[in-house]
């Protein structure tokens, strides 16, 4: 099976590598060609100068880019080179609206589409342990699932086009609240004169346990915020969730508040710090 991967950022680069290691014939594209060349050398794969060229004759085309505008630009460019019956899988965290738009446009060309945002961060991508949330037709999902397993520990179809993106919004809403709570707890422990490592060792075995606590609490206590998913990207994701909430009539008061806390972190110079850096604004 021939596959293409478009977008070689901190997530896409290792994800494309896992596809090659799984035995697929892989051609990659990246806006900065030097990075595509580097990937091709490292993984003994191919690279192309345009999305259309990379997608030509591919059975599956995966993409992981920046935002809705990037998704539209790269997807429509790729579509020009895709054959009927191929499938485009978008791993970008984007809006449900753009997912539905692409589903319709690609369907009109006889091309399948799945919106499939991922969770697990850079480490998950590097270790092939991502969670993939999928929207799209069942038959398209079944055709792509085995390939997606190359870099995923959990894959689930949630419903029609846009459902994967909606699920990712739920994921980011949960993370925002948990990280803020963890930040307040660590700040409280520090000011109370407690040893944070000892506190975490105890409470992480009870009801307070979370992935964020297990993986970020000790680095937060040390003021280390260089672990992949940046504040800038979290604010992009939360803006998508807040916009969707206005459309569907749900209320997200905590999410809106934490989004503003992340704006504080940006003003403190933390745009590229990871999302656990909410603690900084409390210190």
Image (cartoon, rainbow, N blue to C red):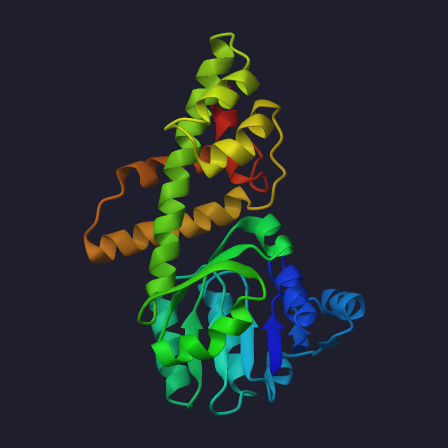
Task: Using the rendered view, name the quadrant where residue 16 is placed.
Answer: bottom right
Q: Residue at x 51, y 84 (%)?
A: 79
Q: How many marks?
A: 0
Q: Return the x and y of residue 89 as percentages of the image width and height.
A: 48, 73
Q: Residue 5 vs residue 179: left or right?
A: right
In the rendered image, which quarter contains the N terminus? Answer: bottom right
Camera sees residue 111: yes
**Residue positioned most to the front:** 205
In this rendered view, identify the residue nearer to me: 176 or 235.
176
Q: Residue at x 42, y 76 (%)?
A: 142
Looking at the picture, does residue 167 appear above or below residue 90? above
Q: Residue at x 63, y 70 (%)?
A: 19
Q: Residue at x 44, y 15 (%)?
A: 188
Camera sees residue 73: no
Task: Using the rendered view, name the quadrant where residue 257 is placed.
Answer: top left
Looking at the picture, does residue 105 appear above or below residue 131? below
Q: Return the x and y of residue 160 as percentages of the image width and height.
A: 31, 71
Q: Residue 207 vs residue 71: left or right?
A: left
Q: Return the x and y of residue 108 as percentages of the image width and height.
A: 37, 89
**Residue positioned most to the right:** 41
Task: Using the rendered view, name the quadrant where residue 216 is placed.
Answer: top right
Q: Return the x and y of residue 154 as percentages of the image width and height.
A: 47, 58
Looking at the picture, does residue 277 appear above or below residue 161? above
**Residue positioned most to the left:** 249
Looking at the picture, does residue 129 appear above or below residue 251? below
């Amino acid at each position: 099976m021939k596959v293409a991967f478009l977008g070689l950022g901190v997530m896409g680069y290792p994800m494309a590598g896992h596809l090659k290691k799984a035995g697929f014939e892989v051609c990659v594209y990246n806006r900065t060609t030097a990075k595509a060349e580097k990937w091709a050398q490292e993984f003994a794969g191919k690279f192309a100068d345009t999305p259309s060229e990379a997608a030509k004759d591919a059975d599956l085309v995966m993409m992981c880019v920046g935002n809705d505008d990037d998704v539209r630009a790269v997807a429509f460019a790729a579509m020009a080179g895709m054959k009927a019956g191929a499938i485009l899988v978008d791993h970008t965290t984007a809006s449900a609206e753009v997912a539905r738009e692409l589903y319709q446009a690609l369907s009109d060309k006889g091309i399948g589409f799945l919106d499939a945002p991922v969770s697990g961060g850079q480490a998950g991508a590097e270790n092939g342990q991502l969670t993939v949330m999928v929207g799209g037709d069942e038959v398209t999902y079944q055709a792509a699932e085995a390939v997606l397993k190359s870099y995923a520990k959990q894959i689930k179809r949630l419903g029609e086009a846009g459902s994967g993106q909606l699920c990712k919004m739920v994921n980011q809403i949960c993370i925002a609240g948990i990280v803020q709570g963890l930040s307040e707890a660590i700040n409280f422990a520090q000011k109370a004169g407690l040893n944070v490592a000892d506190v975490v060792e105890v409470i992480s075995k009870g009801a307070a346990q979370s992935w964020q606590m297990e993986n970020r609490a000790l680095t937060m206590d040390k003021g280390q915020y260089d672990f992949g998913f940046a504040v800038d990207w979290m604010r992009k994701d939360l803006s998508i969730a807040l916009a969707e909430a206005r459309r569907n009539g749900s209320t997200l008061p905590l999410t809106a508040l934490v989004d503003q806390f992340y704006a504080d972190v940006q003003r403190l110079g933390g745009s590229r710090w990871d999302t656990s850096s909410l603690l900084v604004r409390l210190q």
